[in-house]
Image (tube, rainbow, N blue to C red):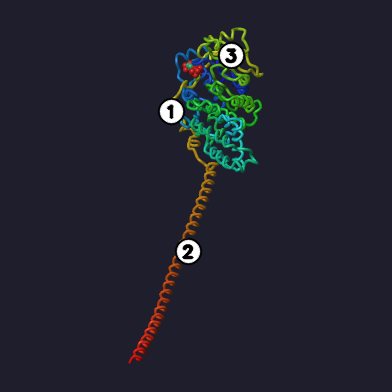
Amino acid sequence: MLQDGKLLIGVGENPAYLLPNMANRHGLICGATGTGKTVTLKVMAESFSELGVPVFLADVKGDLAGCCRTGERSAAIDGRLTKLGLDPESFVYHPFPVRFWDVFGEMGHPVRTTVSEMGASLLARLLDLTDVQAGVLAIVFRVADDKGWLLTDLKDLRSMVAWVTDHAKELLNEYGNVSKQSAGAIQRALLQLEDAGGDVFFGEPDIDLTDWFQCDEKGRGFLNVLHCERLYRSPLLYSTFLLWLLAELFEQLPEAGDPEKPKLVFFFDEAHLLFKGAPRALTEKVEQVVKLIRSKGVGVYFITQQPSDVPDAVLAQLGNKVQHALRAYTPNEQKAVRAAADGFRPNPKFDTREAILDLGTGEALVSFLDEKGRPSVVERATILPPQSLMGPIDDKRREAEIQYDELFGKYETAVDNESAYEIIHADRQKEAEAAAQAEAEKLARKQKEQEEKEQARAQREKEKEERAKQAKRKSSASAKVANSALNAVGREVGRSFTRGVLGVLKKWF
Ligand SMILES: Nc1ncnc2c1ncn2[C@@H]1O[C@H](COP(=O)(O)OP(=O)(O)OP(=O)(O)O)[C@@H](O)[C@H]1O
Ligand SMILES: [Mg+2]
């Protein structure tokens, strides 16, 4: 709720105002489960919307979706309003302009980015690659860039890794060594990412971040609710995605100096997921981005159970704090309460540590930055109720909200434009066609040779036969000659014999 241009979040001894010009100095909402963190987040988000500041909310449990519906009056809320010094009769319940988003495209407009946009270093972290493997991935990106081949989705990246591995020898001098082992490890990590559902996040049309900077016709900032129930089951994907978002915003936004109000505010509910078990390099990147993004007019608010869920370097940058009740049954919990209490400027009127243990639901210790950017003395305050509905909405209502949104249709259908995969695939096809052609030509050549050989053999056979025939003819001709000669000799012999006999006979007679 706005009061005198300031965001009224709760009331204690004094009203607790979050100042618009200090809202980009980030914030933290902490507390044990069920103490009121998500409702506080809603109250803040609603006030930003009223101020004309668009908001981005990571909705892990689905209970932020109710922002698109009118809140419901109840006796408990009337009692809270009275305690806050507000008139329950004149408190206005109303819905806020909400846009639903979902990386998986199921519970909101799909949110996609391209592999190139995410970049080699963030992707290397997402894939949990070693330094050597990350180096190979950087080469893959560089080669794709030099060739002008777009890396849009994971199949582009997989084809590109395979292509670079196949051409490693040619690339060695210009880009460095790409070992088969490293390329294999990248391919395996990519398969794992696909199994975790990471493939749906990469593609086109990719998100135009200016769509998150919009206000409705009344000038109220849109509440962009990112449905994270499924996404947060893959903590590495969840944290990388949110980090990519911040990094992308940081890159795209111009310097804002000290703006009167933020350009956009991020709320990360269940923020411990961002840091728990995250690789050190990822945490360092969050620290760095959170530090730098303030100057672009973007405020980041983390919501988690204990301040110790957030690394110290990040914690030190969170100027606006709301601490709900903590429990202290174990030594570790007692330590956490002490640490949380030490993070506030003490109020001489109460003991911070005791107050943290004593707070009721929807009550909190608050300290916001004052006009000079100093943390105010801690106040014990009752938090306002939200004006929109607390809790989730049914699927039908969500569906209707998505379909009536003017952005409906812009992202719903994925397109597969020509990119590295198609180019490499076409290249491979050409190579395969050329190889098939060469093979066919070789076969035809062999066949021709065989045929020629056959023909020559047949010719030789024919000639042989011919020769044999001729020889036969010749031999039968000479036999004839011999015969006739013999006959002639025979006849001559016969004749001389006859003559001889006749001669003898003549002598006798
Ligand atoms: N400011 C408030 N005004 C009205 N009711 C509140 C307020 N804060 C908390 N409540 C009540 O307490 C319930 C629990 O609050 P909420 O869901 O915000 O807790 P939480 O700390 O986010 O819990 P969890 O850790 O389980 O997410 C709400 O459903 C609501 O009924
Ligand atoms: Mg909650």
Work out whether residue 89 can be spotted. no
Locate residue 454, reporting x and y percent. Answer: 46, 61
Furthest residue in direction front, as rendered: 508
Q: CA distance from mark 2 to mark 3?
A: 100 Å
Task: Tell whether 341 sits left or right of 499.
Answer: right
The label shown at residue 456 is 2
Label whose residue precedes the other's in the sequence (2 or 3): 3
The label shown at residue 340 is 3
What quarter of the picture does the N terminus occupy?
A: top right
Q: At 59% across and 37% down in the image, what residue appears?
A: 179
Up the image or down, 270 lies above or below 377; here it is: below
Furthest residue in direction left, as rendered: 509
Q: Are marks 2 and 1 in contact (CB under 8 Å)?
A: no
Amino acid under disc 3: Ala
Task: Tell whether 196 sits left or right of 177.
Answer: left
- In this orientation, which residue lies closer to the viewer: 81 or 449? 449
- In this orientation, which residue lies closer to the viewer: 414 or 25? 414
Q: Residues within 10 Å of mark 3 (few under 14, many from 20)?
A: many
Q: Residues within 10 Å of mark 1 (few under 14, many from 20)?
A: some
Which type of secondary structure does the marked residue at label 2 adopt? Answer: helix
Label whose residue precedes the other's in the sequence (3 or 1): 3
Locate residue 172, reporting x and y percent. Answer: 63, 40
The label shown at residue 397 is 1
Which type of secondary structure does the marked residue at label 1 adopt? Answer: helix
Q: Which is closer to the viewer, label 2 or label 1? A: 2
Looking at mark 3, is its residue's CB closer than 8 Å to ligand 1?
no
Up the image or down, 289 lies above or below 383; here it is: below
Q: Are marks 2 and 3 in contact (CB under 8 Å)?
A: no
